[in-house]
Amino acid sequence: MIRAPLAPPPVSAACQKKGRLAFGVGRRFLFLLIVGLSWVIPSFWNPRFVYAILVWDIVVLAAFVLDLLQLPKPRQLVIERIWLAAPSLSNLSEVQLSLKNQGGVAVTCTVLDNLPLELREETPLLEFQVPAQREANGRYTVRPRQRGDLAVGEVYVRYQSAAQLAERWAIADLRQTVRIYPDLEQVKRHSIYLARSRQIELQKRTLRQRGLGREFESLREYREGDEFRDICWTATARRGKLVTKLHQVERSQAVWIVVDAGRLLRARVNGLNKLDYTTNAALTLAHLALYSGDRVGLLAYGRKSQQRVPPARGSVHLRQILDQLAVVQAEVSEADHLKAVSTLLWMQKRRSLVVWLTDLAETSMTPEVIESASQLLSRHLLLFVVVAQPDLRTMALRRPSTPEQMYETVAAQDMIQRRELLLSRLRQRGALALEVDPGKLSTGLVNQYLEIKERSLL
């Protein structure tokens, strides 16, 4: 069986006894005992039926012991857990349990896999019919509700023979740590944007737009209107006349994705927190930018930097970004935006595109994130994206019917107006700023990125 590239590795183990008395009685044993007890009534008239009950119980008990002894030992049952797909946020993934019976008797097994609630609300319970020296498989599905590393526990087994007089209890140590990634299916759905990105790149190569970028293309004699900063003084000295450097649009640029993991991103929308939406969008953008030829870096921060990945290219680099986004967790305190800007300015000296995913605090003063973002504008092109709160807009558009609803509506309208005012202030300083609903964040982000590429803004 071919395993998915990002799927957790399979784990297998032989079963062990669960507890000191790792056995019990089956349903048929209890049924036979009840049948024997039915002879108690005639024993009131004929005492010889008491001996018949005693003989019946001895025979049933002997059959129970015989059935217990012929059951395979726990170590003769080997269980393997196989992840058929990489578990990603909000997507169904299949898990397969394989049970191999190395004993000499066919068994009926009930298998319980110990999963955390973040993977599945109901504990998976599978039934196996496994002949002697054969193997049986069963599957169940999980739908992760949380990113990051989750601990998956042991597998518990209860098995009987066809006689169903005795049963054994066993446990297989299949404990492992499983990494839950951002929404991988969303990345696949947005792969259609790759065609548009390649078309934009092809048009640029065909036009070879000179003078718009900062990548050196060629030299020519100075003409009136050329900028003095483009004069190549070394070539001018050699030739004895002014020589101008021509530039073209850079084919490979640095794109930094900055993810705010502070307390504001803990707000939940439709079952996910805002940080989940931002990590999904960040992964989608990273995938598109890398396959468009750009170098992509990642900075996720709270009170301090959680994850830092310098800009690079390639599928290995994409896997690194994916792993880092999977373990980014929202903090309970406000993020330190000034420290994040200092880190970014230290790591990225040359001009780049900075995509900042964050939210705005509702304060009477200018939020720190706005002032911090303004520090980037002198050196970088900033795409500042705020994750909207859909219920706030719904409340602002609601027609109030009570005084309480009127106050709520006015407050919501005031908050929306203030957020737009803050974004307008950033736009006036040269940033690209917008507010996007969580469900449309990935689409809005890649569209903005493609527009920046198409207009050669960087």
Image: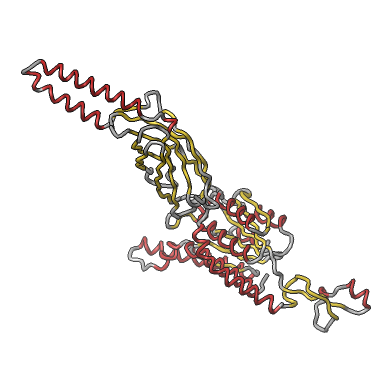
Classify residue 315 by image quadrant. bottom right
- Give the residue displayed 58% in from the left and 63% down from the top: 285
Measured from the top left, where is residue 338 in percent x and y?
Answer: 65, 54
Q: Looking at this view, is 187 or 416 the one in front?
A: 187
Q: Is residue 303 left or right of residue 346?
A: left
Q: Looking at this view, is 138 or 194 the one in front?
A: 138
Q: Is residue 44 left or right of residue 442?
A: left
Looking at this view, name the residue that lies furthest to the bottom: 224
Measured from the top left, where is residue 264 in percent x and y?
Answer: 52, 54
Against 294, residue 36 (above or below) is above
Measured from the top left, where is residue 325 in percent x and y?
Answer: 57, 53
- Give the residue displayed 32% in from the left and 33% down from the top: 161
For the C terminus, give its image quadrant. Answer: bottom right
Q: Is residue 368 visible?
A: no
Q: Is residue 299 left or right of residue 232?
A: left
Number of numbered tags placed on the structure image: 0
Q: Looking at this view, is 259 or 184 the one in front?
A: 184
Q: Is residue 138 visible?
A: yes
Q: Is residue 20 left or right of residue 365?
A: left
Measured from the top left, where is residue 376 in percent x and y?
Answer: 68, 62
Q: Looking at this view, is 105 or 116 the one in front?
A: 105
Against 426, residue 267 (above or below) is above
